Amino acid sequence: MAPMKLGLQLGYWQAQPPANHVALAQEAERLGFDSVWTAEAWGSDAFTPLAWIGAHTTRIKLATGIVQISARTPTSTAMHALTLDHLSQGRVILGLGVSGPQVVEGWYGQPFDKPIARTREYVSIVRQVLRRDAPVTNAGPHYPLPYTGAGAWGVGKPLRSIVHPLRADLPIYLGAEGPKNVALAAEICDGWLPLYYSPFRPEVYAESLARAKPGFQIVQGLAVNVTDDLAAGLAPVKAMLGFYIGGMGARQHNFHKELMARMGFEAEADRIQELFFAGKRGEAIAAVPDAFADEISLVGSAERIRDRLQAWKGTPVTTLLVQGQDPQTLRKIAELVL
């Protein structure tokens, strides 16, 4: 079995740009981390920070986790990826995801219907651009190329990238939660970015991953908190889960809540959402079961974390994607995992 890899998740910016992301990426590279990841929601984008980080590092892979497919056409995303791949000398991992209907329709003004079919078309077009073996075309209804619909002048023609991509096989990973979307990742992508994964419940995703090819990568984000106070260490994990399960999605369409239910905590997920929508956020966070928070994180003393790491090493997960706010935390994590 290949050794577990580490990735550094920097996420998306909050109210102001962070001051230490380049330094953190450089420290992660020095410590032997395999990759550094940036994200986007409805503020900072994922590609620009990676270009800045790539200019200040030499080896660490530069990964989007994730780029929202409604934010850019597939050819535009391919242009971003191939440009950064050249500039970084082949270090890019393209992580894609559909986001959710609130963001897609509320921020990007795009329809959310048929997300699986949209993703399949999107990945196909990106791969066409990267292969550059023919002008890019697509007959599907979501991203028709050339476009001939309403408002078209009728003069569009299939095009091939002016720039020769550095790698035709630039890796594409998919962020996915639902069983069908996870199965799509296993079928058409090089890797998968789960939201929650428990090493103690491999059956949750087993069927969806049945078609994964050899070398398929699974990059699992999780909180790592080295502390002798287990309750205090789990508190930020529970706070995150209370927000995502309770309010990160509409009442009738919350993919995170549905995933928690599939992982064996349906009644608890319902209760968290009920409390959150009643304005009782503190109670919603308190209702998150310690057991669930503990399963999807690495929290406790160094000895406890080392012991629980054994369960992770027995899973198909290939990279643990961790957050670190300071170099000292990264060093502790590297010592434990690498």
Image (cartoon, grey):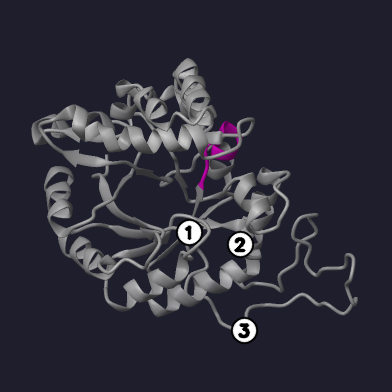
- Give the residue drawn at x 34%, y 25%: 286
Residue marked by disc 3: 162
Label 1 with label 3: CB-CB less than 8 Å: no
Mark 2 or 3 closer to N-term?
2
Q: Residues within 10 Å of mark 2 (few under 14, many from 20)?
A: many
Q: Is residue 206 visible?
A: no
- Give the residue drawn at x 61%, y 36%: 250
Mark 1 or 3 closer to N-term?
1
Query: Residue 92, image x and y in percent?
Result: 42, 66
Pick the front one: 331 or 169: 331
Where is 193 relative to 201, above or below?
Answer: below
Residue marked by disc 1: 40
Query: Residue 244, image x and y in percent?
Result: 46, 37
For residue 71, the mark is 2
Helix, strand, or loop for circle 3?
loop
Helix, strand, or loop for circle 2?
helix
- Give the residue drawn at x 72%, y 77%: 159
Pick the front one: 87 or 269: 269
Identity of the amino acid at label 3? Ile
Would residue 13 be found to the left or right of residue 303 on screen? right
Q: How far apart are marks 2 and 3 (CA)?
A: 23 Å
Closer mark to the observer between disc 2 and disc 3: 2
Identity of the amino acid at label 1? Glu
Identity of the amino acid at label 2? Ala
Q: Is residue 280 visible?
A: yes
Label 2 with label 1: CB-CB less than 8 Å: yes
For residue 198, the mark is none
Query: Residue 318, image x and y in percent?
Result: 33, 44
What span is in magenta? Answer: 175-182
Where is 99 relative to 162, above or below?
Answer: above
